[in-house]
C-alpha cells in the first residue's frame, strides 16, 4: 500500500507539473497595456495597435494589425529577403510612401532614409556587454535582479530578471535568438535590434525572465515597461494561430509596392 500510495503521489505531481505549462504576462509600457502569452515554444504578444506571434517549431512569424484586420505570416528569412529586395528598389518605394509629402520636403526625407539604411548595412556588428549589478527589487510579486546591457560601450537597456521564472521547458530562448537574428539580417548587422537578439542577451533569458525593462537612447530619453501580473496556466493552442477573421496580405502590401 505504501508503494502504491507513493506511485500515485508521483503521478499526481507529474500531472500537476504539466497542467499549467503556459505563462501569461500583463505589462504596462508607458501607460499602454500589453500582454504576452508563452507556451510550447510559441509566443503571442498583444498590444493595442499590433499583434506578434512567434512559432519556434515552425520557424514562423505572424504580424497582425487589429485596426485594419490584416496579417502577414512567414519565416524570418522570407521577411529578411524582402527587406533586402526593398532596399534595391528604395527610390520607387519612397516615392509611394512619401507621395503625400510636399515636394520640397520629399527629397530631404529620401536622403535621410537612404543614409540610415547605408549606415546600418555598412556598420559592423555591435559589441554587446552584459553587466551584473547588485540592485534588487520585487516586481509583480517576484524577486528580481538588475542587469545592464551595453552596446558599443553605451548603456542601452537594463533588465530586471526574475530567476524563479524559467522558460527552458516551454520556450527555447536560444532558438528564439537565432530566429530574431535571421529576421533582422535584412537590415544589416549594425543595428541595436540585432544586438538585443545576440547570444549574450539571450543568455539573460536563460537565467530567468525580465519583469522590468528600461531602454535608453542618445538623448537620454528613457522608456520603461513593467510586468504587473504573472499567471501560469494552460493556454489553448489556437491562441497562437493566425487571427481568425483577418485578411492575409502579402509582403508587397506591407512594403507598399
Image: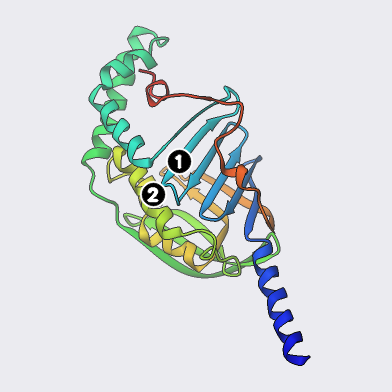
SS assignment at label 2: helix
**Quarter of the rendering containing residue 200:** bottom left
Quadrant that contains the N terminus: bottom right
Q: Is residue 172 left or right of residue 143?
A: left
Q: Earlier in the sequence, mark 2 or mark 1?
A: 1
Residues marked 2 and 1 touching at CB (< 8 Å): yes
Gap between marks 2 and 1, in whole Å? 9 Å
Does residue 249 show up? Answer: yes
Residue under pointer 2: 179
Instruction: Bin the neighbour count of mark 2 within 10 Å (Cα to Cα): few under 14, some 14-19, many 20 and up.
Output: many
Does residue 155 show up? Answer: no
Instruction: Report the residue that reaches farthest toward the bottom.
Output: 2
| Residue 36 image point, x, y percent | 60, 48
| Residue 39 image point, x, y percent | 58, 55
Instruction: Report the residue that reaches farthest toward the left.
Output: 122
Residue under pointer 1: 61
Q: Residue at x 43, y 53 (%)?
A: 176
Amino acid at each position: 500500500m505504501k508503494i502504491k500510495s507513493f506511485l500515485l503521489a508521483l503521478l499526481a505531481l507529474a500531472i500537476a507539473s504539466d497542467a499549467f505549462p503556459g505563462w501569461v504576462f500583463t505589462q504596462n509600457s508607458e501607460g499602454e497595456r500589453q500582454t504576452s502569452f508563452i507556451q510550447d515554444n510559441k509566443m503571442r504578444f498583444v498590444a493595442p495597435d499590433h499583434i506578434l506571434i512567434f512559432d519556434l517549431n515552425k520557424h514562423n512569424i505572424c504580424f497582425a494589425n487589429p485596426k485594419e484586420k490584416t496579417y502577414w505570416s512567414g519565416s524570418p528569412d522570407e521577411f529578411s529577403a524582402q527587406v533586402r529586395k526593398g532596399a534595391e528598389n528604395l527610390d520607387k518605394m519612397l516615392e509611394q510612401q512619401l507621395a503625400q509629402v510636399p515636394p520640397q520636403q520629399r527629397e530631404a526625407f529620401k536622403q535621410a532614409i537612404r543614409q540610415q539604411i547605408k549606415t546600418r548595412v555598412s556598420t559592423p556588428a555591435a559589441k554587446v556587454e552584459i553587466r551584473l549589478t547588485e540592485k534588487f527589487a520585487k516586481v509583480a510579486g517576484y524577486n528580481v535582479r538588475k542587469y545592464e546591457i551595453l552596446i558599443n560601450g553605451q548603456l542601452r537597456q537594463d533588465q530586471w530578471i526574475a530567476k524563479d521564472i524559467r522558460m527552458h521547458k516551454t520556450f527555447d530562448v536560444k532558438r528564439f535568438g537565432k530566429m530574431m537574428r535571421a529576421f533582422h539580417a535584412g537590415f544589416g548587422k549594425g543595428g541595436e535590434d540585432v544586438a538585443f537578439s545576440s547570444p549574450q542577451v539571450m543568455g539573460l533569458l536563460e537565467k530567468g525572465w525580465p519583469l522590468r525593462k528600461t531602454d535608453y537612447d542618445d538623448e537620454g530619453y528613457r522608456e520603461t515597461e513593467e510586468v504587473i501580473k504573472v499567471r501560469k496556466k494552460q493556454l489553448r493552442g489556437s491562441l497562437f494561430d493566425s487571427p481568425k477573421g483577418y485578411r492575409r496580405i502579402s509582403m508587397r502590401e506591407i512594403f507598399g509596392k
